[in-house]
């Protein structure tokens, strides 16, 4: 179980147990409120997953909770055996298909359209609730609490236990490559798909799990209130929960709990101060606006403060011994005579409207080789990579990887087939740690030894380092670490040395020449740094205006008169004239 | 049977006119200041309830309408100030999220000031029927709403395509900083857009309010059918949005007339939103989609 963070889990359970025991001392009145706060925290976890991690504006979470509550009320009226122990999870499951249905348009959409869809769903659910009543409501049939947990304190413990189970489960999932991909799609859908993640699947799972969690919270609320009213699930509540999610940072474990407390205790505080209770909602609106303008949240600020505090008291983050990013002798990798072709591009053509970006381009990448792809700006280098990796809607020609046809495959399927790429600008989500990013890129949990080896090989920081604290130059190295960690057949590196110093790019060049032997992948290197290309590549292709104008070993191709002209302009003609 | 259908469909026209006008306002703010505005009905509710409260206290009707319009305009200006002060360079999604947060605040204040979900009587601004077709009495208010929607859509189209200020505003919505560097008075222009949208929204709500469950929340949520209309216009075309709003109202009128469907009348905007998005976004991929 390498995805379980044992110190965190044990600490969390102990803290929860102590907190619950302490809350018991306060008496039933307060305990009832605390029960509500924990249930609200569960609902917030659902929104946090979609809004905080996957970056969508989700405005119908209480409708999902309402579906969960509705289901529980029906199961109760029908006298289905199993009590709340069984009804609550069933309520969660019933909410799942609704979550998926809402997610379907969102597979292609992002934030704003999703916000409109969810608001529409919440309004539709409201109108149906207004036209009907909860099952058993008119006959005054109460939802019984589960046997053994009927008293206020016992039901409180029950709710806390459910909260603990959901928190730990979500924490485990968030450490898997799937969980990391949720953060990935928020940051860049292309970047995530390039790691072989199906963006559609990633979104669907996020919504399905979020709907389940919200449905569970609705079922628990049915047990707490015992008589349901539609006002608990109306659209205003959904909107308030979204505002609190943003304000508190509900995708973080403590953020959800803080948010739940705010939702329940802020109105209580106002009541005790003889102030109107809905002042809380105004405060949440302002808090969310403030959080949006600062780009933080209560929980994120607390974590930042804690990190600074740890540094101040001398607890240093884990690091590797310093790696000197200095290169020795750089030689291209040895390639066997007559080595077979790993990547074969034949007759590749791409048009953007009337503009011909690539015209009948042939490229062969032999096994174990580093192939350079150079050319002036606008020559079509990045277009070539986009076409090969599946990020263009269409192209002409045939591309095969290790003999298998790639044409027509989606980007993530090409990545899974063993074709990985990096981007000109780094697309690493800043919310992840170095280690979780590497796991996401590799699409598996790397063994600690393997992770250490890759990171130290290229001079990246310790896996526990938050990427937010890593400088941009190092992030570019991490890009390379990510693609090789997946052990693909071929990696396409799009200007990996951009923004690096001269020494650093030579160091990187040396590491790139080691990739075939160390990771079994051939390399296509797109670069402007001619020196780097000359030293690291077995052979190069020179593109200009979408055509290959020269190909061969660097020493030969770079001396080609066409290449010189493409780079330096019409110098020769001028001197001749 | 046919006449019954026509009757119920036409009965949806007044609502359709309001959706159309609100939808056109949403497209207006999106195209000119690049904000998808979830408070697109709530700011109008502010103005409308100003009128209602004044009227209840014996204030004469038409001066009350004037003050209500000013209140709606001021609410929109405050919103605009928040946007240009703190979020002018923020991504579109963040701006939308801000309007969601502010919607919570506006509704909370609105419900508090107007006494919660308690219904309040609305004055009919333009009482009486205009004419009768197919046995359906079309009210003057309905004619006025639809007329306003057409006028606003036409004026907005002309303004954007044929005036210098319209061109500047389009530049502003796409590249605020560049526009500012070119010497445009971006703040003033943006606030002006918000003010106009606030007035038009308030007018739409004042006209439709007497036919709705009259509380602040319900009126603020008219933004949902307005979004459906704006999506039919792809958040670009004022005329398509207008047609979309009217069509939406008529579909609602039709579903209200069928007993089995009546209960689900409120889901019509949602289903239309879903259908339009699935259709219009069928080719969109990757990060480029909104």
Image (cartoon, grey):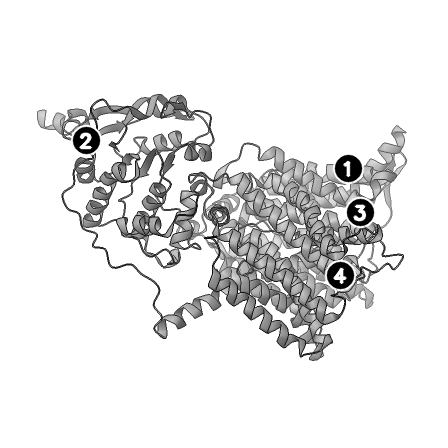
Asked if both marks, 4 and 3, belong to the same chain, the answer given is no
Asked if both marks, 2 and 1, belong to the same chain, the answer given is no
Res. B251 mark: 1
Q: Label 3's element?
A: helix
Look at the image and tell me in which quarter the C terminus of chain A lies.
top left
Provide residue A322's location: percent of width, then percent of height: 24, 58
Quick check: A20 left or right of A542?
A: right
Q: Which mark lies nearer to you, 2 or 3?
A: 2
Q: Callout 4: few (<14), some (14-19), or many (20+) C-alpha neighbours within 10 Å?
A: some
Labels 3 and 1: the sequence-earlier one = 3
Res. A146 mark: 4
Residue annotated with mark 3: B141
Asked if both marks, 1 and 4, belong to the same chain, the answer given is no
Marks 1 and 4: CB-CB under 8 Å? no
Which subunit holds the residue at mark 3? B
Q: Label 4's element?
A: loop
Marks 2 and 3: CB-CB under 8 Å? no
Q: Which mark lies nearer to you, 3 or 1?
A: 1
**Mark 3–mark 1 distance (CA, rounded to whole Å):** 20 Å
Q: Callout 1: few (<14), some (14-19), or many (20+) C-alpha neighbours within 10 Å?
A: many
Which subunit holds the residue at mark 2? A
């Amino acid at each position: 179980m390498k995805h379980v963070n044992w110190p965190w889990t044990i600490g969390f359970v102990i803290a929860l147990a102590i907190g619950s025991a302490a809350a018991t001392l306060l008496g039933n009145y307060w305990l009832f409120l605390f029960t509500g706060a924990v249930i609200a925290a569960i609902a917030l976890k659902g929104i946090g997953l979609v809004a905080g991690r996957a970056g969508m504006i989700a405005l119908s979470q209480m409708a999902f909770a309402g579906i969960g509550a509705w289901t529980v009320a029906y199961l109760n009226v029908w006298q289905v055996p199993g009590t709340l122990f069984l009804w609550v999870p069933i309520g969660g499951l019933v909410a799942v298909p609704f979550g998926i249905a809402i997610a379907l348009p969102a597979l292609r959409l992002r934030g704003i359209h999703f916000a409109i869809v969810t608001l529409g769903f919440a309004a539709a659910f409201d109108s149906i609730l207004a036209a009907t009543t909860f099952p058993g409501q008119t006959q005054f049939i109460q939802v019984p609490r589960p046997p053994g947990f009927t008293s206020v304190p016992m039901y409180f413990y029950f709710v806390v236990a459910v909260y603990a189970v959901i928190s730990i489960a979500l924490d485990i999932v968030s450490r898997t490559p799937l969980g990391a991909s949720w953060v990935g799609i928020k940051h860049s859908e292309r970047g995530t798909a390039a790691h072989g993640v199906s963006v559609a699947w990633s979104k669907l799972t996020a919504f399905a799990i979020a709907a389940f969690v919200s449905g569970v919270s609705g079922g628990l609320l049915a047990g707490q209130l015992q008589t349901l009213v539609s006002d608990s699930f109306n659209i205003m509540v959904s909107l308030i929960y979204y505002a609190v999610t943003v304000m508190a940072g509900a995708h973080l474990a403590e953020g959800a709990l803080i948010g739940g407390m705010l939702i329940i205790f802020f109105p209580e505080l106002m009541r005790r101060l003889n102030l109107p209770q809905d002042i809380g909602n105004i405060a949440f609106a302002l808090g969310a606006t403030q959080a949006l303008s600062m780009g933080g949240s209560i929980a994120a600020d607390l974590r930042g403060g804690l990190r600074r505090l740890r540094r101040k008291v001398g607890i240093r983050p884990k690091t590797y011994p310093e790696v000197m990013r200095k290169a020795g002798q750089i030689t291209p990798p040895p390639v066997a005579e007559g080595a077979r072709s790993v990547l074969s591009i034949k007759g590749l053509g791409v048009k953007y409207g009337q503009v011909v970006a690539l015209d009948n381009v042939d490229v062969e990448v032999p096994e174990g080789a580093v192939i350079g792809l150079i050319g002036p700006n606008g020559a079509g280098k990045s277009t070539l990579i986009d076409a090969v990796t599946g990020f263009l809607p269409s192209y002409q020609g045939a591309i095969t990887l290790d003999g298998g046809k790639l044409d027509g495959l989606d980007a993530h399927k090409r990545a899974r087939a063993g074709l990985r790429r990096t981007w000109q600008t780094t697309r690493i989500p800043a919310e992840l740690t170095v280690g979780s990013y590497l796991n996401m890129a590799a699409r598996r949990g790397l063994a600690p030894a393997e992770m250490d080896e890759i990171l130290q090989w290229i001079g990246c920081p310790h896996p526990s380092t938050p990427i937010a604290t890593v400088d941009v130059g190092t992030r570019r190295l991490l890009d390379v670490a990510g693609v090789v960690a997946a052990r693909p057949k071929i990696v396409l590196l799009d200007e990996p040395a951009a923004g690096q110093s001269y020494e650093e790019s030579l160091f990187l060049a040396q590491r790139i020449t080691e990739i075939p032997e160390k990771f079994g992948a051939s390399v296509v290197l797109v670069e402007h740094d001619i020196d780097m290309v000359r030293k690291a590549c077995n052979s190069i292709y020179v593109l200009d205006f979408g055509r290959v104008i020269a190909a061969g070993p660097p020493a030969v191709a770079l001396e080609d008169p066409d290449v010189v002209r493409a780079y330096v302009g019409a110098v020769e003609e001028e001197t001749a004239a | 049977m046919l006449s019954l259908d026509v009757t119920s469909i036409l009965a949806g026209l007044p609502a359709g006119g309001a959706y159309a006008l609100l939808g056109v306002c949403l497209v207006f703010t999106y195209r000119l200041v690049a904000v998808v505005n979830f408070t697109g009905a709530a700011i109008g509710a502010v103005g409308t309830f100003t009128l209602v409260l004044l009227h209840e206290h014996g204030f004469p009707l038409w001066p009350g309408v004037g003050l209500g319009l000013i209140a709606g305009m001021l609410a929109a200006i405050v919103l605009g100030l928040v946007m240009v002060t703190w979020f002018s360079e923020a991504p579109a999604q963040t701006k939308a999220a801000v309007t969601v947060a502010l919607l919570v605040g506006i509704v909370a204040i609105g419900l508090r000031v107007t006494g919660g979900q308690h219904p309040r009587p609305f004055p009919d601004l333009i009482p009486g029927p205009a004419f009768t077709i197919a046995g359906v009495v079309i009210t003057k208010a309905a004619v006025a709403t639809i007329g306003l929607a057409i006028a606003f859509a036409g004026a907005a189209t002309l303004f954007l395509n044929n005036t210098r200020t319209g061109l500047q505003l389009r530049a502003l919505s796409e590249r605020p900083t560049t526009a500012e560097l070119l010497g445009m008075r971006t703040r003033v222009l943006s606030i002006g857009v918000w003010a106009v949208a606030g007035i038009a929204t308030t007018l739409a709500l004042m006209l439709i309010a007497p036919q709705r469950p009259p509380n602040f929340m319900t009126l603020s949520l008219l933004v949902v059918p307005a979004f459906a209309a704006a999506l039919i216009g792809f958040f670009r075309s004022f005329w398509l949005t207008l047609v979309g709003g009217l069509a939406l109202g008529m579909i609602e009128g039709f579903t209200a007339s069928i007993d089995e469907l009546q209960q689900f009348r409120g889901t019509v905007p949602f289903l239309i939103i879903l259908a339009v998005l699935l259709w219009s976004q069928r080719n969109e991929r990757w990060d480029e989609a909104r």
